[in-house]
Image (cartoon, rainbow, N blue to C red):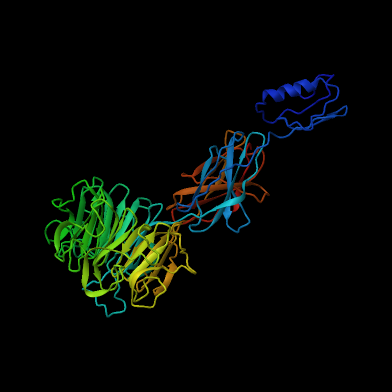
Amino acid sequence: MWGRDGWPSGHALTASRPAAMRTVPLAWALLVCAVAGMSVVNLATVEATFTGQTEASGNQVTAAASFTLAAPAGVSAPSGWESGVPLAWNSLDDADEYQVRYRADGATEWFETEWETGAQASIAGLVNNEVYEFSVRGRNALRTGEWGPASPLTAMPRQWAQMSTAGGEDPEDDWSAPSASDEHTCAVTVSGRAYCWGDNRYGQLGVDADTDHIPTPTPVDTTTGLTDTNVVDITVGWHHSCALTGDGQVWCWGRNNSGQLGDGSTGSSAIPTAVDTNATFAQISANGWHTCAVTTAGAAYCWGWNAGATIGDGTTTQRNAPTAVSTGTGLTDTNVDSVLAGDEHTCALTVDGQAYCWGSNAFGQVGDGTTTWRLTPTAVATTTGLSPTNVAQLSAGGRHTCAVTDAGRAYCWGARWNGQLGDGTQHTDEGLTTPTPVLTDSGLTATNVASVSAGTHHTCALTTDGAAYCWGRNLRNHLGVDDDGLSVLSPTPVITDGTDLTGTNVGSLASGYKYTCAMTTAGRVSCWGRNDSGQLGDGSTGRRDVPTSMIAATAVPIRAPQDLNASATDFPTSLRVSHSSVEGADQYQVRRRLQGSTNWTTSSWFQGTIRNISNLEAGETYEFSVRARNDHVTTDWAPEPPVTGTPGS
């Protein structure tokens, strides 16, 4: 159907050849052929796939650029990973490539990605916990569609994936001194980097620095085994911290007076040191002066202080390296799901939902109906609500323990001198030796509890719809509740007005010694309560009565790439952009624009220092700049002014 410019005489039609051809449906082809021989032709309402138009003998052809290309539908932009947002959309039948644009919410300038195939894209290099707008469009060889959806989607990249708090009553500390605080906090970013903050008198922050405390999140040393990306879990004791890497190895740092670092010695270390074992672990937990872990096969190990029988090996002998927990009373080498370290006792949950505890039992924290210390795992009593198969989650605190059943009911047992059991009672000398239901008259129900976190003298719970409740000791308002009493005896909602928390957005809770932290579903962390050592992570050492946002992690500085160059290639419509490598940078991004234009086109993030930029106009001059990033920070664009390059030159 399509011929050279100027058809044979007798036909009053001429048309330019298209810049790019695409298949025309047979019905269209027949229609154009049929009307070509008519003396009067008006195709003004017909969309064809060629470009340009001419008039002859009063007959007019209107040639559209292509068939109409709709905006993509079903666009989704969920929050959920560090410094970036993943997008997806429904593919279009007529689209060959797609482009995403994004901007900070409220900004006027859009950033546009390179055109790429496939109905998904990952936008990286964003600022954590900031809201961004996103939209997407498609194109084929002849037409670029509209941006969709009509109202841009919003999403928020998150930074934190998991956190751990601790601190307790260390008998060796002088608690009359204002600076005597054991509290520190650690967290892991979603990209796998470990950070700690708070008390650092024993090197428990993993920072080889001569300072007693650091009130802001600080990266843990990565010179010995941890990296910027390999940490999957972190836990803290009174004066030490441990991290689990993706390959199942455990690294610990801080005080080691009781062998809690597990490296076979009692020498403290301010940088991570490998635990002395050939086992591969899947879960870890630290508290007090001991640490425990579960192997990938389902066996429990503990190490450190054992005067209170916290190791569970049938002795009270200190263990400086991982030691197998006894399997003679219910646990096996393959049935342990998780192990939870308390101050002076330890508990484990089996894969079939049964709870076991061992260690100090003066207040009934083992939960077996007695106050007898247990040297080996002992089944928690199942006469008052728990069963051998219905426990879904456990938490071991100071001298009490709490559990959540698979139906969503919370139970606690052990010491209750501050009301930390949440059953409405308070007794200085006597605890409860069997699981007792937490009250359900103020927000918690018999079916809505998702998890519990037992601190030293208080407990907090998270509901299935994302609300936080706390109870127990409230001397420094570490409950974050609207109550002036010294103790709160039943679950009470955490204050959310004027904070980052709401009644539905809490994703996890961690209770320490006189302070608590919460992580929202968007990865923002807020803490409240005692803050003598900066354990709340807000940059201060002042007490906080309500949830207060933790500041962003300390950036690991990197410089912008240098020596940017845009050189011609063998192809007349592409340029090769190269630049220097940046120490500490993981990825790079290039942007370009026609010289004199105000609109930039931004590439996806990539590794390496060379990028071929294609689909340029031969003979046109383009401006280029580049930036670098790691999992904490993105540099400014460089150089200024941008370098230039001309394809085909």
Q: Nearer the viewer, residue 345 or 167?
A: 345
- Tell me residue 192's x, y (percent): 38, 52
Asked where in the image residue 222 lies, by quadrant, the reply is: bottom left
Q: Position of residue 541 (x, y in %)?
A: 39, 74
Quadrant containing the N terminus is top right
Q: Is residue 261 visible?
A: no
Q: From the viewer's perspective, is residue 485 above or below residue 341?
A: below
Left of 606 or right of it: where is 374? Answer: left
88 over 338 or under it: above or below: above
* Number of marks: 0
Is residue 645 in sight in this rendering? yes
Q: Residue furthest right?
A: 57
x%, y% of residue 414? 23, 66
The residue depicted at 40 percent of the width and 71 percent of the height is 481
* Residue 98, percent from left and from top: 58, 40
* Residue 184 as seen in the image, left or right of residue 126: left
Task: Choose between 330 and 336: the one closer to the eye.
Answer: 330
Name the quadrant containing residue 507.
bottom left
Q: Residue furthest bottom?
A: 176
Which quadrant: the C terminus? top right
